[in-house]
Amino acid sequence: MKNVHTSLIVVLIAALACVSIPANAQKALTIVWAEWDPANYLQELSKDFTAETGIAVDVVQIPWPNFQDKVFTAFVGKSDLYDIVIGDSQWLGRNSVGRHYIDMTEWINANIDVNSIYGPAMTAFAEYPKGSGKYWALPAQVDAAGYVYRKDLFEAPKEMQAFQAKYGYALAPPKTYAQLRDIAEFFTRPEQDLYGIATWYSKEYDGITMGFQQVMWSFGGAYGDAETYKVNGHINSDNAVKALEFYTDLLQFAPPDAPNYYWLETLNAYTAGKVAMGMNYFAFFPGVVNPETNPVSHDKSGFFMAPAGPEGHYISIGGQGMSISAYSKNQDIAKQYMKWFMQKQVQEKWAKLGGFTPHKAVLESDAFKMVTPFNEAFAASFPYLRDFWAVPEYAELLEVCQTNWNEAISKIKSAKEALDTIARKHEEIFEEAGYYDE
Amino acid sequence: METSRGMSDYQLKMAFIMPTMVLLILMNIFPLLWSLYLSFHRYKASMPAAPKFIGTRNYTRLLADPEMWGYFQTTAYFVILAVAAQFLIGFGLALLLNREFRYKGFVTTLLLLPMMLSPVVVGLFWRFMLSSDNAGLLNFFLSPLLTSPIGWTTNPKVAMLAVVIVDTWMWSPFMMLISLAGLSAVPKYLYEAADVDRASAWFKFRWITLPLVSPLLLIALLFRTMDAFKMFDIVYVLTREGGPGTVTETVSMNLYKLAFRNYNTGKACAMAYLLLVIIVALSNIYVKYLNRVKAEA
């Protein structure tokens, strides 16, 4: 009887072994990204990779407020939980110097046609130090801050006439910050629970910084000298003060809760019909054109790129780069995936699904501009993109900006006091980190 | 004495104690000592560089930083307001509940619910209740009385009050529970004797209730003070990391940023030790007072 059992087990094992299993069925790749629509698109796109290679791909999504903390904690613990990390551009410095990302320079030069990728995206999301030619990532999702507006309000003849009579020019999506202020003021009607604008003022993560920095640059301010890391005289220049005063002034045309607004709150304010214009990353705009999430104005929304200021035109860059975790045990598969991802036909499908491709030819194609009602404004924003410091100390620098700019818009400090504090503290951080050592 | 398998009483004792001891050393004692060691070093957990000894520099820089004192001031302000409010409300509720009435059990359970909730959940739903526009429940109810909605979490003059309200809503039941336990332990015959002597209600409260309940009240105050000093979660969720500006940024909130955003591990460890010293000092004051009250009783 015992022999019969043994024979049965042997036969069973043999039978199981004979069942055809794809060679890579056991392999799996874990990609970590923030919880939002593009991560769903990537999961969908990755089915093609699985079909081609038999390698399963799991896109792990972490809610935005905890995204950075969770990923960085995993890095500090040298966890192999994630193979590919799709992280913010500011993370590059810290994670490359901290050796949490693998150096991909040689591999990228040998396997990827860098010229096919939009140059500024490669610099922003992949290269550290900037201009060094050292790559730690490939751009995955290129994004920008842009605006959505209520076409039904902007195109209503009564509103157009009243606006023309009051401001002396036609009501249309603003091209400058001065026009943006006029339009925001015009539509601010608290008695109707309607306000002119919803933009980012929140102290959470990088909220107010991403909202204000593009205004600061466009007014002629700057974070500092990228060569010498000197900050004083740049971030607290007269132009920067004017910019912060402008941004604080704009708050009066926003809903009362606006000092707490970041991307989710601005999106909610717009879809609830509370504001005439709302700023957000373009990647969040699918929620605006979806009738389920925006029953009020899904079919009455138009889009425009962030306006220009008196001293130039700059827009906050969004989006993320795709890096390989130094602690991953699947680095070869991760490279295989990234090589697959950067192919033109895959990028075309990525764009079709709703992803913002970094592939130059796809990005510039008419087909891309037609995919969504906001892709055209997004593509137009590209030449104006700029980024925050991407140095390893970026989190400390960001924290100082967040606190002081939030204090300025809350009238706890004047614009000048807030900017002087930032200049002093940023220089202290750079000095401590040795940037001023000879 | 040896067991039948040859283990002495001492060995048996150790066999039972050791797993707990090892766990305690690994999970509590080692991190405590390691963080003390790191507090004297320049070290970032997110960077590959080894800790570099810098003596007491982390401590001196923290103590010389006016912003750090600002966070301590904010925390002290919050602790005083919140613990005082919780004490008064909790003790008041306990006095009301310390009598027989219909549905007493149900009402007591209902009042205890807030402290059973997760602070993050509490912070989230109060975020909606205290929304600074008329969509916020509190502003909606107050709208007939107000010309414009109150910026509960956006107005620097009001934001701390919002945090105190939420913490008080959540933790007054704890004060109530401990006070109720103390009140029910007061012997009834003392009140009967006072009644015979025609003592006033105030006299009975001042000379019977308060002295007998105060040791328990002090313990409740000690727990709440220690806990309030570490306030993090409600501030993180309700006022978005201590805003507006740094108006509600407590020491623990700032410590979190220092440790897990900036990964300034050495400095964060030094700050944690400063916080520990303050909490231990405060606890000692309470314990001394508690001993005195117990001796008098």
Image (cartoon, rainbow, N blue to C red):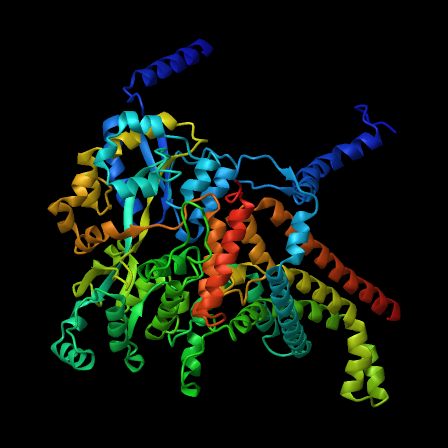
Q: Which x, y percent locates residue B187?
A: 80, 74
Q: Is residue B283 left or right of residue A120?
A: right
The answer to which of A374 and B121 lies nearer the viewer is: A374
Q: Residue at x 46, y 45 (%)?
A: A70
Q: Is residue A203 visible?
A: yes
Q: Looking at the picture, does residue A303 appear above or below residue A249?
A: above
Q: Looking at the picture, does residue A396 appear above or below residue A342?
A: below
Residue ranking furthest to the top: A3
Q: Which x, y percent locates residue B202?
A: 77, 86
Q: Which quarter of the rendered picture does the N terminus of chain B lie within? A: top right
Q: Residue at x 62, y 62 (%)?
A: B66
Q: Is residue B124 visible?
A: no
The answer to which of A272 and B2 lies nearer the viewer is: A272
Q: Looking at the picture, does residue A51 appear above or below residue A217?
A: above
Residue ranking furthest to the front: A438
In the picture, residue A172 is in which quadrant? bottom left
In the picture, residue A338 is in which quadrant? top left
In the picture, residue B130 is in which quadrant? bottom left
Q: Is residue B71 left or right of residue A208?
A: right
Q: Residue at x 38, y 56 (%)?
A: A222
Q: Which quarter of the rendered picture does the C terminus of chain B lie within? A: bottom right
Q: Which x, y percent locates residue A179?
A: 23, 70
Q: Is residue B8 left or right of residue A410?
A: right
Q: Which x, y percent locates residue A40?
A: 29, 45
The answer to which of A40 and A154 lies nearer the viewer is: A154
